[in-house]
Image (cartoon, rainbow, N blue to C red):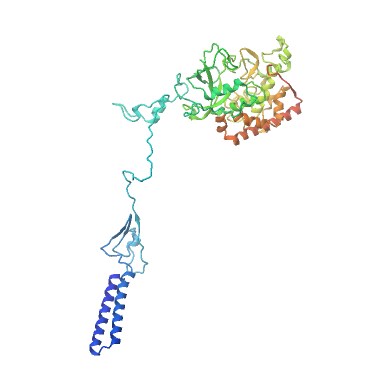
Amino acid sequence: MYIIRSGEVQNVLIRWSCSCFLILSKCIRRYPPSKRNWIIAGVCCIYLFYVVSQAAHVLPQDRFSDRHKFKRTRGIFTPKFNNAFQDTTGSPMAQNADVSSTASPKYNVVYITLKSKRRKPAIIRGTVRPKLRKKTVSKNKRIRPNTLNEADNGSERKTRQEYESEISPRPLRNVYHSLNVNTHNSDTDSHYSSIRIYSERAPPWFSKDDIEALRFLADCKITGIKEVSFTGRRNLLLFESQTDAPLNSPGKYDHVGDDSVCQGRCGLIKRPLDMSEVFAFHLDRILGLNRSVPAASRKFSFFHDSQPSPVVLWDPSLSPADNEVQSSVRMTWGSYQRSLKHKCWHRGVVPKAESGCSSIHHYEWSRLALFDFLLQVYNRLDRNCCGFRPRKEDTCVELGLHRDCADQDSIELVHIVHRKHDPRRLVLIDNKGYFDRDEDNLDFKLLEGIKELPEEAVSVLSSQRLREKLLQSLFLDQLYWESQGGRQGIEKLIDVIERRAKVLLTYINAHGIRVIPMDRST
């Protein structure tokens, strides 16, 4: 197949026009010219030159000329090739193609080139040059040594991970005894508090000391952290803080005395998995029990990956419980059931010596049973998980205690604690609840032997206002509220408590349990 190029077309037209002109000149010589012939000849010549000039523009340009291999516009290159049938990719299929065969014309390939970045920005009128911000280092923040940027003479350069591992407080035995870091929930605003009270007064079930204790736990400046070890339990991590409160008017939780563990005022740091203790504190106050220690949520940047952790107020007035069962009063399940029958210290009557009563008042066990049933806290009264089907992650299964349910009367109770100056009333500690237990697997052993329940708590459960009060109360702790997924997550926890409350009310009616008023002081 022969390809006609644009230059060849122009040459053919020019030669054809010249030959026509010569033929006309010969005709003029042979025959006398007339005015009409001259006009026709002139018009033909003008038409021929017009056709030739237009053909050069209408026909496609010579894309296969060697003179212009690249046609460049701004930022775009159009390559030209010597062979009309050569594939631009250089593939073997295109190289072995037969030139004489019929093929469609190839399109040009456009290559877009990226221009290099300007070293200096273009100056545009009307723009505002941003201010350069200098990096400021807080006085309370540790400064990283130069070993991260420059190597010392004869020493290897340390990586970031190696340096952080050196200054990290993990494991917990390498704790700071004198911290000069700001552990407020907000580094920018020192007046920010995660305990939010937007009304004039706090909810009525909180006392003034409760609100003051919550603000201390959530917002106080930490001056030191220490690790305290006790017999039969994991080590406790305490944070210390110096308070400016006057000592001449101490509150309920401001016990000033000899305390070798805590200097000043302290809080107990727990694991993020124990966050349900914050819920337990609010539930205790709403039900009018008032037996748990204040608990709030707080973030610590130096461990737990800055996750919110529950912090519980350290109460030095608690009676020592440095034993295997962590109890101020050591009791077994059998002695506990016998004390319920004797109604120890009821109506101020001193129990007989042969009754085997402890120093705990009879009504305290009713409060404890109701509280533990709603949260399914089995560690106190059912240490071996004999009243329900435990899971693999439960403590009783991990320790193998669930297999020792044959002689339940000899199983000791755990976390039976009271204050030194008030041995009649219990103090509920370690209140980790379980919200993922179905209603068909509740631990009813916690209610065994209970014949009376506090009227105030039962009235709240049956008043259809438990949800409203829990939402209002838990909203105070912003970190806990957000850590549970906001209102949607809190609503799910309240659903569990409401279903258990209905089960408890049914149990009360079925077993004839009396609902009587119980004075908070008893």
| 307 or 360, nearer to the observer | 307
Residue 514 appears left or right of 127: right
Residue 297 appears left or right of 302: right
| 230 or 61, nearer to the observer | 61
| Residue shown at the point (67%, 32%) measured from the top left | 498
> Which residue, as the protein is rendered here, is positioned at the far top?
353
Task: Quadrant for residue 488, please give it.
Answer: top right
Task: Quadrant for residue 202, please give it.
Answer: top right
| Residue shown at the point (65%, 16%) measured from the top left | 425
* x then y, percent, for residue 97: 34, 64
Is residue 2 in view from this perspective? no
> Which residue, as the protein is rendered here, is positioned at the far left?
29
Task: Quadrant for residue 36, please give it.
Answer: bottom left
* x then y, percent, for residue 194: 54, 28
* x then y, percent, for residue 84: 32, 65
| 66 or 339, nearer to the observer | 66
* x then y, percent, for residue 70: 29, 59
Which image quarter holds the C terminus? Answer: top right
Residue 146 appears left or right of 66: right
Is residue 345 in view from this perspective? yes
> Which residue, as the protein is rendered here, is positioned at the far bottom?
31
Task: Determine whether 420 is above or below 196 in the image.
Answer: above
Which image quarter holds the N terminus? Answer: bottom left
| 410 or 418, nearer to the observer | 418
| Residue shown at the point (59%, 27%) measured from the top left | 278
Please tell me how many numbered marks the rendered image carries: 0
